[in-house]
Amino acid sequence: MIGLKDLIGQKRPVQLLANALQNGKMPHAWLFTGEDGVGKKTAALALAMISNCQNPDLTGRPASPADGQSRGWPRACGSCRPCKKIAAGVHPEVRVLAPSGPNIRIDRIRSLCSDLALKSDERSWRFVIIDPAGRMNAEAANALLKILEEPPEHTVFVLIAADTGDLLPTIVSRCQHIRFHPITPVDIERYLRDQCQTDPQQAMIVAALARGSLGRAIEMAAQDWSARRDFFIRQLSKLPAQPRGLRHVLAEIMAKDKDRIEANLEIMKNWYRDLAVYSAAPELLYNRDISDQVYRSGSQTTMDQILEKTDAIAAAEKALTTNANARLVMDELVEALAVQGGKTY
């Protein structure tokens, strides 16, 4: 069965959703906020599936005596026709609205309004999941606000965003807000070991680096993150002493691997962040498994140098969002990261 118990480390959000299902008091609009990969979309789809399931268990009775964790959490059967359609993403009354390009534009919301004006199947709950809702442009957000002010019957909106500040205050005020919190490294590590069969050492490293995001952790584990992290940390340590030609080999490698540029920059940010905190708060290190290396590098790097390098990474990230030439951006970045004591070689 598919249920709210499948959400990892989100006890309060799960309890709030369970109460709404069990008490039959479903608000017309939810707002789920939190970091990417903490279960917001999973929760929205679970809510839609349970609401439309032909054989739901709203009591949350354990499936077996040993399955005590599921007590109190409603769940769908997962095998009826509506459940299968929702799982496959083809249920006509459950739609996920995502950006086509950088934003969700007003024509998408107008089309949605037209569809919602049609009479729905009264046996089904209509769910509209907007993810990420913060990507609506101003016109689209105002058009959505009009729907939320006079919502169609038997229709539930689920808006997914990183923070309430991503949306108009008037939209936020018309939603029941649930904040999803970062998942603990212990829970992430356990999930990777038990559900993804990740090597225990790799699971420990990834859990520490995922910053509370299970989705990010799963992606990192699948990409052998620790090996890639070790490669880039070695390259960063070599940059100041390398000739310009070799530095730009690294820039070329990064620019060609377009699908991983953001992730590779994240590795670098985590490294310099650790160099900044290693002496004052060693318990907060992301790269705890190589703490000795962090200490050695941190003792040889000033705070001003660390700030300059993190600023350079932030500038590169911003440039990439404007569709700047990736190779030129990476060339500039490696030159900035190679500066050591005001000198490059």
Image (spheres, helix red, strand yellow):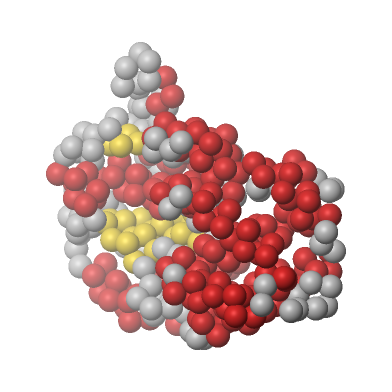
Q: Is residue 265 above or below residue 193?
A: below
- In terms of depth relative to the viewer, which is nearer, 99 or 226? 226
Q: Quadrant of the N terminus?
A: top left
Residue at position x 67%, y 45% in the image: 290
| Spot occupied by residue 251 in the image (x, y as percentages of width and height) | 55, 75
Q: Is residue 74 left or right of residue 339?
A: left
Residue at position x 34%, y 66% in the image: 97
Q: Is residue 276 left or right of residue 268?
A: right
| Spot occupied by residue 273 in the image (x, y as percentages of width and height) | 72, 58
* Residue extending furthest toward the left: 81
**Looking at the rendering, which quadrant does residue 339 occupy?**
bottom right
* Numbered marks: total: 0
| Spot occupied by residue 83 in the image (x, y as percentages of width and height) | 22, 44
Q: Is residue 217 left or right of residue 303?
A: left
| Spot occupied by residue 172 in the image (x, y as percentages of width and height) | 54, 63
- In terms of depth relative to the viewer, which is nearer, 286 or 70? 286
